[in-house]
Amino acid sequence: MTDPVFTPTRLGPVRLRNRIVKCATNEGLSREGLVTDRLIEWHREFAQGGVGMTTLAYCSVSPEGRTYRHQMWMREEALPGLSRFAQVVQREGARAAIQLGHAGWFAHPHAIGGRPLGPSRTFSPHAQTFARAMEAADFERIRDDFAAAARLAAEAGFNAIEVHLGHGYLLNQFLTPWNNRRRDRWGGPIENRARFPREVLLAVREAAGRDVAVYAKLNMEDGFRGGLELHESLAVARMLQSDRSVDAIQLTGGHTTRTPFFLMRGDVPLAEMIANDRNRVRRTALRLLGPFLMKPYRFEEAFFFDAARQFLAELEVPLMLLGGINQLETMNRAIEEGFAFVAMGRALIRQPGLPRLMQRGQTESLCVHCNLCVAEMERDGTRCVFRTDEKPPPP
Ligand SMILES: Cc1cc2nc3c(=O)[nH]c(=O)nc-3n(C[C@H](O)[C@H](O)[C@H](O)COP(=O)(O)O)c2cc1C
Ligand code: SF4
């Protein structure tokens, strides 16, 4: 009998060969904000390895939304590389997704050549400056940037667009009372805090066209007092469902500035992160603030399962379970319980061929949650430090 996780399905208008999604994990392989050959080859491995869909990680919708100078950002010049990316992935039988986002208050001033902006004028430890509170023209411009980026992704041939509403990025900053101190129609009760992310998703939905799936990566909770709480996130998910702006929601949690390891769990490789960071200011900030900000969270298999079940109980929109999924049994259980997809990061970074290996009897990923791949991102591109040169098995 076929494992439930290996049954084909649809994500909105797009058919996937199975329910395994390689989630967005910053590759550290773009240069000058453009796709490189190494970036394409990195994703080719996941596609060859058998995932249903792989996600090109964090692409900023404009230069002001970047956290690193070399980070991908969406403009006409990026189109040929993006098209090649989508074609290579699709030729291997997988679907190609792209994560679109804006870093808001933690965009780095050196990367963007100016002061970052956010919902409110608050001090950003990442940027080491106060963010500028967004004004009417900013709302319009950023919404248009998301729509333009979605159009470009569709033109490049991507099958799906993931909009980043999590991990403390701009749209999450709106949802989070800790970042959003506004008293106008964009702040206060959750209906107001959700207004801008909803408008962005509706604009992306329209720009993406009928053949491209759109989904949100949404925090279920930020993981600290004063952050977004689960009952509020549930309300946001209900709003997205009634807006019909998304074909699915990928459920996550954690806030890069406050609770960066809440979203990954496992070891905190602070020494390696400091050693590998090329930016002097960030190195110093990590040395001073890292021990306070990088609180460790114990790793457990499928650590978001319980929280995500509460969403499953209340929503009809298809859901993607994410976070610490390593075992075939967990993957099958998630699908049997009603999740439409499982999204996986480190287990696949450890072994891009994991889906095919699981179809041949492997039952569990070899990832040990050391998070050294996070530190590698800054050195010479994200990679598992335990990987030898295993190639994914042939189909
Ligand atoms: C090296 C690395 C880079 C990441 N970069 C991103 C990113 O660009 N965008 C994002 O939404 N999440 C990012 N994440 C978080 C993952 O998408 C995922 O939410 C998290 O790793 C939990 O899933 P896992 O336990 O299957 O790895 C990153 C994680 C890792 C390990
Ligand atoms: S470095 Fe390898 S083993 Fe460690 S968390 Fe990353 S993928 Fe897993």
Image: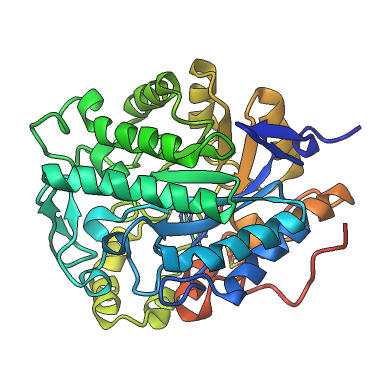
Q: Residue at x 64, y 46 (%)?
A: 21
Report whether residue 106 is seen: yes
Residue 244's place in the image compared with 288, above or below, is: above
Q: Residue at x 82, y 50 (%)?
A: 358
Residue 195 falls in which quadrant of the image? top left
Residue 378 % position (x, y): 44, 75
Report whether residue 167 is seen: no
For this view, does 118 lie left or right of residue 294? left
Q: Residue at x 52, y 70 (%)?
A: 35
Residue 228's place in the image compared with 348, above or below, is: above
Residue 199's place in the image compared with 154, above or below, is: above
For this view, does 232 lie left or right of residue 238? left
Q: Nearer the viewer, residue 11 or 256?
A: 11
Q: How is the image coloured?
A: rainbow
Residue 271's place in the image compared with 232, above or below, is: below
Q: Residue at x 31, y 80 (%)?
A: 279
